[in-house]
Amino acid sequence: MMSNAPLHHKLKIQIDNHLSKVLSDNLPEIQNFINEVNQTYLNHEKVAKSSKKTSQLTRKELIESNAKLKEELDKKVVFQDKLIAAIQQLNGAGKDLEHNDNLDGLLDILHKEIELKKEFQQQLFNSKAMAEEANEAKSEFLSTMSHEIRTPLNAIIGLIYIMEKENSLQSFHENIEVLKNSAQNLFLLINDILDFSKIEAGKVDIEKIPFNLEQLAQQIAKSMEARASENLNKIEVVVDPDFVPNLISDPLRINQVITNLVSNAVKFTYDGTITIKLKQIAVQNKFSTFKVEVIDNGIGIDKENFQSIFEKFTQAETKTSRLYGGTGLGLVITKKLLSLLGSEIKFESELGVGSNFYFTMHLPIDIKQNAVNTHDLQEDYKEENLKGLKVLLVEDNLINIKIAQKIMGQWDVDVDLAENGLIGVEKFNNNKYDVILMDLSMPVMDGYDATTAIRQTDKLIPIIALTASASFGYLDRALQIGINEYIIKPFNPKELNMKLRKYYNP
């Protein structure tokens, strides 16, 4: 039976050529065969058309896709070139990069470089701003605070000295002694801060002069006896029999180091013994190698706090500061001074047993034994009468004027007064003086301008700055304009007597 589907044109040609119509119509088997073959032709053609259409669409899409991909790749190459150029411009980090296919890697490098640059620039800006601000604030703070604190302290210490000399108010001597010690302690605290600032700024010069270390140790022990007795302590000096005492270095700074260590030992020891030990290690080629130890049997230090004691403004524990006081600068200053002297502070300590702070030095021996008198600035220095010495005191503070006149009056010094720098210059031009004591901070004309004016006509007259401005910047300026030396308020009358004595010719 014939199918309703039309014969495929290729099959129809074959039937017409090889099979008669009568035969194909009358034999059902032949008809069925023709139908099956026809359907196969039709299906094949349908599939072929569908495949052709599908093939054509895929190729078109592929062309479009390839075009888009090429465009993106071109953009990628351009972008990569720009990235590499940007990286190279930053700091050369991308100098070895070519057209790397890893765009994410390039982006990551660029991102990191930009962030590092930004961070570095911000840190640089912050550091510069902080340094400038800190330096300015530090200088101003030290100068202002030094002046404001030292001026009233000068009055306190000076009046105490006058009352002792005049032997007045006998019933209040005990209270006066307490007041004196308190003022002296405050003075030492201020000196610690100023010393630390001076060391930090690199303004400490180490001298090389002959001195006797054994004598120095004995003087330190004697000067600390009164303080030690307050805690029922005693101080002893132990020196090796073969110790070489005559050395060349900076006795003032070595004195400061040992005094700081002894002061600490006294502070943290109760009813005990502080030992200053001088131990000879070697003597060779006119050099002495020796060890200085300061040993106590005080509270000791916990091992956990070994490092913190050398950090500025810190002590081993917070409660230590409350119980014993102090700025926490003593050991910091000691460490820095020893470093300038070519040595290093070391220590051994056990909590509840005690401590041993020590250092080793290698110094030239003073063969000629021309040791300076390290006794000069000790508390038992005896003031000398300076009768006939003519001093011009240039000072604007009435209390300080009264104190200075009273103190120098004890030595029979002839004191003339000028209330400011301008009057001081006028008096200098009209009178003859042996020494000028010059305050630096005054109204009308300050000590700097007054000194400059005096130096224009007289290069030789001794000018001693008597000032509460202890900042090294101000003092350096004073020395540069012609001031011979300076005494910082509150001053020790013994120091003033010693300096005036240098210019005294009876």
Image (tube, rainbow, N blue to C red):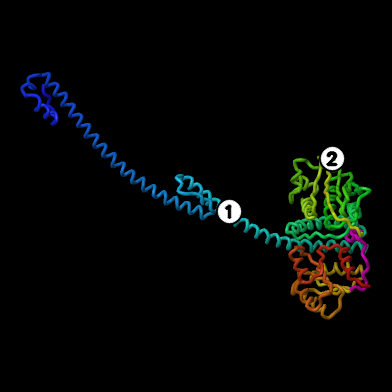
Query: Three-letter amino acid code at disc 1?
Result: Phe
Query: Three-letter amino acid code at disc 2?
Result: Val
User: Residue 8 appears at what percent x and percent y?
Assistant: 14, 30
Label pair 2/1, CB-CB below 8 angstroms: no
Residue 258 vertical position relative to residue 463 in the rendered view, above or below: above
Question: What whole-number distance in Å separates the C-alpha atoms at marks 2 and 1?
Answer: 50 Å
Q: Residue furthest front?
A: 18
User: Dividing the image into 4 quarters, which one contains the N terminus?
Assistant: top left
Label 2 Cα neighbours within 10 Å, binned few <14 / some 14-19 / many ≥20: few
Q: Main secondary structure of the magenta part?
A: loop
Q: Which mark is residue 147?
A: none
Q: Which residue is mark 2?
A: 353
Q: Which mark is residue 120?
A: 1
- Quarter assignment of residue 461: bottom right
- Report whether 340 appears left or right of 281: left
Q: Which residues are magenta?
A: 369-389
Q: Earlier in the sequence, mark 2 or mark 1?
A: 1
- Report whether 166 appears left or right of 56: right
Of labels 2 and 1, the one closer to you: 1
Residue 324 vertical position relative to residue 498 in the rendered view, above or below: above
User: Residue 434 appears at what percent x and percent y?
Assistant: 87, 74
Foreground: 337 or 246?
Answer: 246
Q: Visible in this render: residue 182?
A: no
Q: Secondary structure at mark 1?
A: helix
Q: Secondary structure at mark 2?
A: loop
Find out whether residue 25 is within the magenta segment.
Answer: no
